[in-house]
Image (cartoon, rainbow, N blue to C red):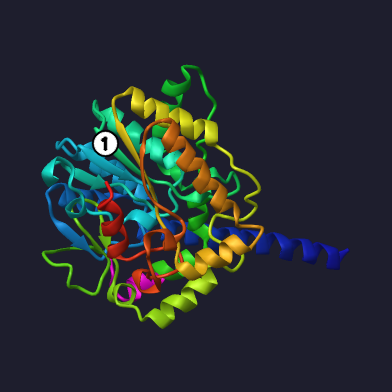
Amino acid sequence: MKKNYDQKKWFFKTIILISILLIATGVCNFAIDSAGVFSHNELKEAAKALINDKMIAGLSNYDERQLQKLIIENSDKKINTIFLGSSRGMQLRQSYLRFGGGSQKFFNHGMSGSSLEDYMAIIGLYESKGYLPKKVIIGVDPWIFNKNSGQFRWKSIGQYYKNILGKMNAGKLEVDLSDNSKYLQLINLDYTVANLNSIITLKKKHKFYITNTIAVDDFVREPDGSIHYSYNVRFQKDIDTQISAKMAANAPVYSLEMFYKLSNTKLFEDFIAYLQQNGIEVIFLLPPYHPITYNLLVKDPKYKIIMDVEIYLKNLASSRNLKITGSYNPQNDNFSSVDFSDGKHGKDIVMKKLCEKF
C-alpha cells in the first residue's frame, strides 16, 4: 500500500511541476513575443511608415494580414489600383504599371500563401473604409481552388471575409473564424527558443528600420507594398536556383497536395461578379513557376491539375470579358531559369514583363 501511495504522490507532483513549467513558458512567450504574435505595436509603426511613403527594411516573421489591415484602416489616401495575391506577386510595383499614365495610386496587398478568403477580406477592409478601388489585379495561384491547400492564415482578418460573403449571398452565413493556432505558440518549443535568442542577442521583436535605398542586404518593403528580398535571394546563383526548383516539385508540393478537383469555383465566380457589379475592373495575373518546377509538376498525375486551373481561368476571363496576363507555364512568356529565385517565385523581370501586357 505504501508503494502505491508513493507512486500516486510522485504522479501528482509531476503533473503540478509540468503545469507550472508550461504556465511559466506561456507567460514568458507572451511577454517577449519576438514575432509579434500577440501584440501589433511594431506593426502599427511599420504601417505608419509605409502610409507616409517611407521604405522599410528588416521586418520579418510577423502577421502579414494584420499589417495589411493596419495600412488600409489608417491610410487617408484613396487607392485606385490594388494587387491581391500571394508572395508570388509581391514584386509587382507601381512603377511597372502604366494605368492613367502612371498617376494612379497603387498598393500591393500580396501576402504569403494568400487564398480566396484573403482576396475577399482585403476587399472587405476597403468597404469598411467606405470605398473600393477602381481596378483589382488578382494574382491567381492554382491552390485557391484546392480545398486541401492547408491555407488558414486568412482567419487573422476573417471577419472582413465574412462581411463580404454576407453581402454576396444576402443571407445569414456560418463561418468558422476560430484560430487557436497562435495560442499554441505560448508553449511551442521553437517559439520559446526564438524568444530566448531575441533576449540573448538583444534584438527586440522583429525590428524594422526606415531606409531610403533598396541597396541593403535585407528584406525591404516599398511604400506601394511591393518587396525586395535580401541579397542571397536577389543575387542567387542560377545553379542554386535550379536545385531549389527541383526540390519545389518534390512532394509535398506547396498547397497542391490532395488536389483532386477544382473547388471554390462558384465562390470565386461570385466574387468576380461582385467586383464587376461594383464597377471594378478585374485583371487576372497568373504567376509562372520555374521552368524545371513546372515541367516536373505537369508530368506528375498528382499535380498536373494546375493545367486545368489555367484553362478554367482563361475561359472565365473570356466569358466575363476580363484581361488576363501570364501563365503557370513560363515558356509561354519566354521566361528562363535566370528569371527566377526558386521554384515558384520570379524575380522583378517577371512581374515587369507581365505588367507590360496590361
Quadrant position of residue 215: bottom left
Position of residue 145 in the picture relative to residue 57 (left or right):
right
For residue 184, say whether it is visible.
Answer: yes
How many numbered marks appear? 1
Position of residue 321 in the picture relative to residue 293 (left or right):
left
* Residue at the (51%, 67%) spot, across then down: 293
Quadrant position of residue 127: top left
For residue 155, say whether it is visible.
Answer: no
Q: Is residue 197 magenta?
A: yes
Residue 44, horizontal then vertical, whole percent: 24, 48
* Residue at the (55%, 52%) spot, across then down: 307
* Residue at the (48%, 34%) spot, across then down: 268
Q: Which residue is mark 1?
A: 135
Residue 274, horizontal then vertical, whole percent: 39, 26
Which residue is most to the right? Answer: 1
Position of residue 285 in the picture relative to residue 181 (left or right):
left
Residue 74, horizontal then vertical, whole percent: 20, 39
Image height of 179 relative to 113, above or below: above
Instruction: Using a 10 Å C-alpha cutoff, classify the residue at mark 1 as few (fewer than 14 neighbours), some (14 to 19) or many (20 or more).
Output: many
* Stretch in magenta: 196-206
Between 282 and 206, the residue placed more toward the observer is 282
Between 9 and 119, the residue placed more toward the observer is 119
Name which residue type carries label 1: Lys
Residue 148, horizontal then vertical, whole percent: 60, 48
